Image (cartoon, rainbow, N blue to C red):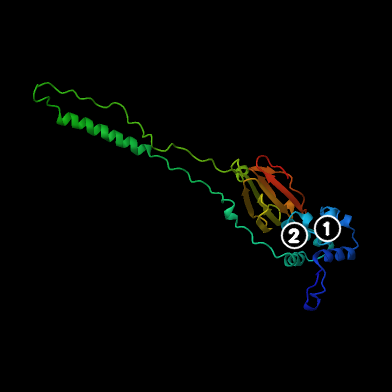
């Protein structure tokens, strides 16, 4: 159901909260019934219907609640969120994710030293030295008439200590895809089963990302202390937090608000 915004109705149209209240009444639903079906607490539903969004915890969470409540009472969620942005100064420009985290890079395999070539060069040097000794110095000392004793190297040259040690980087495994330094919190999400609307904030409440994560797509976020998430379709998203898979994220179609910190995954 559209909430209407034709020119003649522009001045008389209800506010966002009033529009939700009227739609709920027309659908013959109580606040408790809407709360039970959306998992948005009843006091928050009542506050939103009075255009009080202070209990939502920020504009990002308010938009998530509005989308959920709009679907429950039959309103156009996109139109309602657009109305909310008009009435509250518009949507803030998202912070470029590149400023908050670096994309994962697969390290190239280190170049191996060519020991075969080194050994061949050492053998050629030894043979050349022995040949020079036999040909050029076999006549003995010109003053004493005694043969000059010459030593022949018997040991092979040791590899230079500056040569890089041979090593191979382990092939990244599925469980290590979201690995991150211990002094940061890293969240990687994969829309494995279906698409999901998501938003992410850093520990200062700054918006990192907001939008639809299409099926098969992935997103990775890092922060020094905390990452707050809203999952519009929690059952369709797989989460890896600090390199560890989160087994229970919610059900398909369920809106979940979660927070993660450093160490083992912990819902805030």
Q: Which residue is mark 1?
A: 47
Density class for disc 2 (Cα within 10 Å; few <14, some 14-19, many ≥20) is: many
Give how far across and how far down residue 49 sits, in percent: 84, 61
> Could you tell whether 53 is left or right of 164 in the image?
right
Task: Give the number of the disc on residue 63.
Answer: 2
SS at mark 2 in the image: helix
**Residue at (83, 58) in percent of width and height:** 47
In this view, 28 is above or below 11? above
Give how far across and how far down residue 103 sits, in percent: 56, 51
Q: Quadrant of the N terminus?
A: bottom right
Mark 1 or mark 2, which has the lower sequence index?
A: 1
Residue 78 picture quarter = bottom right
**Residue at (19, 32) in percent of width and height:** 132
**Residue at (82, 63) in percent of width and height:** 17
The one of 177 and 102 positioned closer to us in this rendering: 102
Task: Give the number of the disc on residue 182.
Answer: none
Mark 1 or 2: in front is 1
Residue 121 picture quarter = top left
In this view, 177 is above or below 196? above
The one of 122 and 24 positioned closer to us in this rendering: 24
Density class for disc 1 (Cα within 10 Å; few <14, some 14-19, many ≥20) is: some
């Amino acid at each position: 159901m559209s909430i209407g915004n034709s020119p003649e109705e522009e001045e008389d149209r209800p506010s966002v909260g009033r529009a939700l209240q009227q739609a709920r009444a027309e659908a013959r639903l109580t606040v408790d019934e809407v709360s039970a079906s959306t998992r948005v607490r009843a006091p928050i539903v009542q506050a939103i219907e009075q255009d009080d969004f202070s209990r939502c915890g920020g504009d990002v969470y308010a938009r998530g609640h509005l989308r959920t409540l709009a679907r429950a009472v039959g309103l156009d969620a996109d139109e309602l969120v657009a109305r909310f942005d008009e009435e509250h100064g518009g949507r803030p420009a998202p912070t470029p994710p590149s400023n908050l985290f670096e994309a994962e890079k697969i390290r190239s395999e280190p170049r191996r030293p060519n020991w075969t070539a080194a050994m061949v060069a050492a053998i050629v040097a030894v043979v050349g030295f022995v040949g020079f000794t036999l040909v050029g110095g076999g006549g003995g000392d010109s003053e004493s008439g005694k043969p000059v004793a010459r030593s022949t190297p018997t040991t092979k040259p040791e590899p230079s200590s500056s040569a890089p040690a041979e090593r191979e980087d382990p092939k990244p495994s599925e469980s290590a895809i979201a690995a991150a330094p211990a002094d940061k919190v890293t969240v990687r999400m994969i829309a494995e089963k279906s698409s999901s609307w998501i938003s992410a904030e850093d520990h200062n409440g700054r918006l990192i990302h907001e939008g639809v994560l299409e099926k098969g797509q992935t997103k990775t976020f890092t922060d020094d202390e905390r990452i707050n998430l809203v999952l519009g379709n929690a059952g369709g998203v797989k989460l890896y937090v600090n390199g560890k898979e989160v087994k229970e994220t919610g059900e398909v179609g369920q809106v979940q608000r979660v927070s993660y910190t450093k160490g083992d995954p912990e819902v805030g």
